[in-house]
Amino acid sequence: MKLEQLNFHHLFYFWRVAKLGHLTQAAQELHTSQSAVSAQIRQLEERLGEALFAREGRRLLLTDTGQLVLAYAENIFGLSQEMLGRLQGRTAGITRLRVGSVATLSRNYQENWIRPLLADPSVVLTLESGVLEGLLTRLMQHQLDVVLANETVPSDPDRPLHCRFLGSQSISLVGPASRWASQSLRVPEDLDGLDIALPGPRHALRAQFDALCASAGVSPRLRAEVDDMAMLRLIARDSGWLTVLPEVVVQDELRTGLLVTVGQSTTLQERFYAITTPHRHRIELLEQLLVRAPAEQAGS
C-alpha cells in the first residue's frame, strides 16, 4: 500500500472511535450514522489488510494493529490540531515551543532563557542542540521555532533570517577556590605557562582568545580544549586547572564557592543571539522571550 492510497478521512473516523471506545458516540460526534462510521473503518481495514477492532460483546477492543495505528493517528491529528491553532493565532490550550541551540552554547544560558516557561503547565518544550548549519536548515524547514547561537548569521537573500541580539557576557578566568581564593590575574598578561582549559576551536571565542594571547606574547599551557560547555563546566570544577569561559557556564559552582573568578577580560565577550525566520507563525510566548531586556536574558 502506498501513501496516496491511504484515506485520511477513514483514519480520522477510526481515531474518533478508538478514542471514544464506542461507535454510537463517535457517530453522534461526527454527525453521521453508526453504519457510515462502520463502513469507513471497514474500508480502512481493507486497505491496511488488518483488523483494527475486535468485538467483545458490545465493546470494541483494539487489536495489536489497532493500537499501533492509533499511536500514529494520535500524532497525525494531534499535530494537525496544533497546526490549526498556530495558523489561527490561538494562545489557549497547549503551546509547543521548539528551541534549537548550538552545541557550544552554555546549557545554563539556555535554561535561564527558557526559565519563564518552566512553571507554565500549558507549554511543551522541545530542546535540540547541534551544529549551527544543521539547526538553521531545520529552522528554514519550520521544524524549529528559534535557534539560540553565540554568533551571527551572514546575510543571504536565498536564506532570509532574523538575528536578534539577546545580550552578552564578559569572559572570565575561573579556578578552584581551594587554590585561587583571594588571588587575581590579568587576562591574558598573567597566563604565561599556566595550566588552562579553553573552549574548543569551534567556539566563537576561541580565535579571539588565541589572538589576544599572541598579541601579548603569552603562551598558556593548554591542557584541554572542549566544545561542549557542559563538559567544560565539569573540567573547570574537577581538574584543578584554570578555565576561560563565560561565568554563566559555572554559575552554580561560583554561587556555592566551589569555583572563584580569578580574572576577567572585557575585551572578550560572548554574545548571544536568537535566530528566527521572518515569515514564522507568531507564538506569543516566543515573542515575549525575544523582547526581554538583554541584561535579563544573559544573567548569570
Image (tube, rainbow, N blue to C red):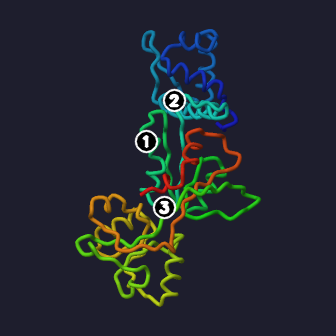
Q: Which of marks 2 and 1 is nearer the N terminus?
A: 2
Q: Is mark 1 on a helix, strand or loop?
A: loop
Tell me how far mark 3 sits from mark 2, CA to CA. Answer: 38 Å
- Residue matched to label 2: 70
Observer-nearest of 186 and 113: 186
- Residue depicted at x 54% and y 42%: 97
Residue 45: quadrant of the picture:
top right
Residue 251 point in image, percent of width and height = 36, 59
- Residue matched to label 1: 118
As drawn, the residue found furthest toward the left would be: 178
- Residue depicted at x 22% and y 72%: 178
What's the residue type where badge 2 is placed? Leu
Which label lies toward us, 3 or 2? 3
Report whether residue 144 is seen: no
Q: In this view, does 292 lie to the left or right of 242?
A: right
Quick check: 137 above or below 39? below
Q: Is residue 190 left or right of residue 159?
A: left
Which label lies toward us, 2 or 1? 1
Residue 241 point in image, percent of width and height = 32, 76
Tell me how far mark 2 sits from mark 1, CA to CA. Answer: 30 Å
Q: In which quarter of the image is the C terminus?
A: bottom left
